[in-house]
Image (cartoon, rainbow, N blue to C red):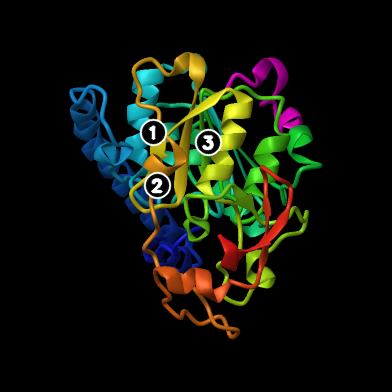
Amino acid sequence: MKVKNLVPSIFSRILSGNRSEKAAVRRLMHEIQEAKTLAARSLILQLRTLGIVDRLQDCEFKVFSQFGDDGIIQYLIYHTNPSSPTFVEFGVENYREANTRFLLINDNWRGLVMDGSSDYIESIRRDDIYWRYDLTAACAFIDCDNIESLLEEHGFAGDAGDLGILSIDIDGNDYWVWDRINNVDPAIVIVEYNSVFGANRAVTVPYNPSFDRTAAHDSCLYWGCSVKALCQLAEKKGYAFVGCNSNGNNAYFVKKERLGALKVMTPEEGYVESRFRESRDPSGQLTFLSGSQRQQAIAGMSVVDVESGESIRVADL
């Protein structure tokens, strides 16, 4: 789930001008990026003085992430010390706003990013970060049948699958795709969850390889899975749930052998309800539903209880 970033879109229009204009804008964008990165380094040093925190939200700061995830990620890599400075992130759009961009630039990690839009991938490849850093950008609409082969094809699986971070944000089959991935071994996993489904039931939308949240329901609120579903899957895969970001859309999991003193949470303890209002009407206009209104809007839709395998209505959550 992404929020449009106005500044890069303005720059993109300017970049359609002549060569000197393009060069000037690229220099400006690079200087802004460098300034933001430099400013964040003092925040990283502050994080390292905090010790172990009770809530991940206390570590948040934003550089290139959509919300405060850049700070959470810096906190977790400091305390887990991943053996491999590599990441895989999919569902990145144009990568201007992403969980791993700051890692790439500040920490010089190597990574693979994927998105289903060829325009977005071409935009990433034209970005200066593509030659400055070891980044691979691949166009793919990810499903359960292709994810492992994509990781292998691009050199991030098998012997090279010892990842620092795996970040999943595909607005639909997130649960099912993480369940299918067995050829990488990340120290930290970040998965988007749908807080509209609440904290008490382990549910997900039924698997559909061509799932599109804009087509699944007019409101665009019917997608993904609950945080409890992710916690149960994490336990099966050998991960512990350590919390969510303050905006209530990303859940964090750490490989159990790398936990150290990090605080482990139950789904109920770590759940954060989102407050962003992204609901739509049939014409695609924002309707700004909030709180329980959001669940009511999709009350008649069905989700899968991953504990029982039964199909239930959202109204019964």
- Where disc 2 sits, the SS reads loop
Of discs 2 and 1, which sits in the foreground?
A: 1
**Mark nearer the viewer, 3 or 2:** 2
The amino acid on which the numbered mark 1 sits, given as a three-letter code, is: Ile
Q: Bin the neighbour count of mark 2 within 10 Å (Cα to Cα): few under 14, some 14-19, many 20 and up.
A: some
Q: Position of residue 145 (x, y in %)?
A: 81, 42
Give the labeled residue for mark 2: 65
Mark 1 lies on a secondary structure that is helix
Residue 111, image x, y percentages:
56, 31
Q: CA distance from mark 2 to mark 1?
A: 10 Å
Q: Point out residue 188 in the picture as x, y percentages from the top left corner.
A: 49, 28
**Residue 144, picture quadrant:** top right
The residue carrying mark 1 is: 73
The reply to whether residue 56 is in sight is yes
- Is residue 162 found inside the magenta-colored segment of the image? yes
N-term mark: 3 or 2: 2
Nearest to the eye among marks 3 and 1: give it.
Answer: 1
**Alpha carbon distance from label 3 to label 2:** 21 Å
